[in-house]
Amino acid sequence: MTHCFLRFSVIILIITTVQLSQARSSTCCDDYCYSLDPDRTQSKHFATKTAYEVIRGSSTSQEHVVRHCRPSKFWMLVRHGTRLPGKSDIESMPPILNDLRDTILENYAHQKSPKRGRMCPQDLDLLKQWQWDKNITVQYESFLTDQGWDDLKSLAMREKDRFSEIFDGHYDEQRYLFRHTKTQRTEASFKAFAEGLFGEESLDSISTEPGPNDDVLLKPYDFCPAYTANKEKIKDPDSELSKFVRSPLYTQTLADISTRLGFQHVLTTDQIDAMWNACRFEQAWNLRQPSPWCSVFTKTHVNVIEYKEDLNYYYQNSYGYAMGSNLSCHAMADMMKHMGRKEGEQVVGYFTHESAIQIFLVALEARKDTEDLRADNYHNMRQRQFVSSDLAPFAANVAVVRYECDDPVEPVKLKFFLNEKTLKFDWCNRGLCNWSEVAYQYGRFLDGNCDEMYCR
């Protein structure tokens, strides 16, 4: 009798295991076809590798028009445009992606894909045709792309059209001040922006202010040991990022992606990251051509992975970093100095990187949530203010415009723009701020010693 019971238990266990395995392989996620989706709204959620064109404000917006006021000065902090991957990605991605492409196609050929949530034939055809662009080599790591050039050139043309009172006439070094970090992508972004303002024939005559080796204005995070230490701390097992990566939500997401692609095991982090980065880069390079690697993710997958990215940036460059409010002191003081006086250059343009944009927004106290992003509040933060895709895509920019107004009490007003959309503050009337309010809000950056403040 005992032997019969044991045999029966083993049979039940085997049946249950088979049923669970079949259940896992029969469904994973929502049915979705990237190739046939005309909107592809998830392309707005690719974190800091989001294309600028899908995020920026409307070309026809009239937000820059202020009644009884005339724009007189323009100050802008700009991230470089769309770029190529860095050295490590260029070296690691091609072999991983080639192997994944072949195995996914083999999985589908042998009917290992799920019954629900499987890739559509059109997406599989895209994947079948995919090849790594052999022109993308380490020699050109992180270089600006053609789309990146267009990002900045078009931005300049739109700003020139909006603020024609400021951007009038030809280049004059007394009226224009430009500076970029010591990288190919920011220098090329500056040149693209200058071409948009003055035309290609003017590029040779336009000068930039040489930045110092320790450029605390445009890259303060590179010269702050506390920032570097905090960046490493984010990798600790008890960090919010690490806890989220171990959470049931995230681990199930990776399992679902793996099942969708026909795998009977969960893909490694390196494999998921390679597909995620290929998707984001390729979609940013070719705005109207669907990337085969974006088709492996559903919109739900993208939202979850975006939140993982946001947790990293939130605790590295934003309100989750205790010292973040002073890190952009030099840039804030520079903006206040230029905006607080009539004299001096009318146009200032600084070309930098994603981290500089994010920490500058912290100094402004812009887009701040009422609670911190955490590993356990993903669902509560779906409408969050801090979204790296929206704040720091390729070509992200913060512009500050000074207006001279017919107001006898407060004639000088400022307006702040993030990616060509008005930035609003609770202390400022509908985004148009009196200079006295700005001076009160950010006076500490003018009054203090930034060399002492910025890394403390």
Image (cartoon, rainbow, N blue to C red):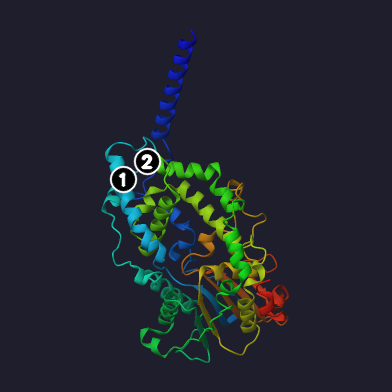
In this rendering, is residue 398 above or below 38? below
Label 1 belongs to which residue?
A: 103
Residue at 42 percent across and 22 percent down: it is 15
Q: Residues within 10 Å of mark 1 (few under 14, many from 20)?
A: some
Q: Residue at x 38, y 57 (%)?
A: 278
In the depicted structure, whether residue 8 falls above or below residue 422: above
Q: Secondary structure at mark 2?
A: loop
Residue 88 in the figure: left or right of residue 226: left
Q: Nearer the viewer, residue 134 or 353?
A: 134
Whole-percent x and y of residue 252?
Answer: 49, 41
Please identify the quadrant where the C terminus is shown: bottom right
| The residue positioned farthest toward the top in the image shown | 1
Q: Residue 283 appears in which quarter of the rendering? A: bottom left
22 shown above or below 359: above
Instruction: State how far apart marks 1 and 2 are (Cα).
Output: 9 Å
Residue at image coords 39%, 34% = 25
Residue 331 coordinates in the image, percent (x, y): 60, 77
Contact, mark 1 vs mark 2 (Cβ under 8 Å): yes
> Horizontal placement of 296 versus 368: left or right?
left
Q: Earlier in the sequence, mark 1 or mark 2?
A: 1
- Decide: few, some or many residues near mark 2? Use Cα within 10 Å; few <14, some 14-19, many ≥20: many
Q: Which residue is mark 2?
A: 263
* Residue depicted at 40% across the width and 81% down the height: 195
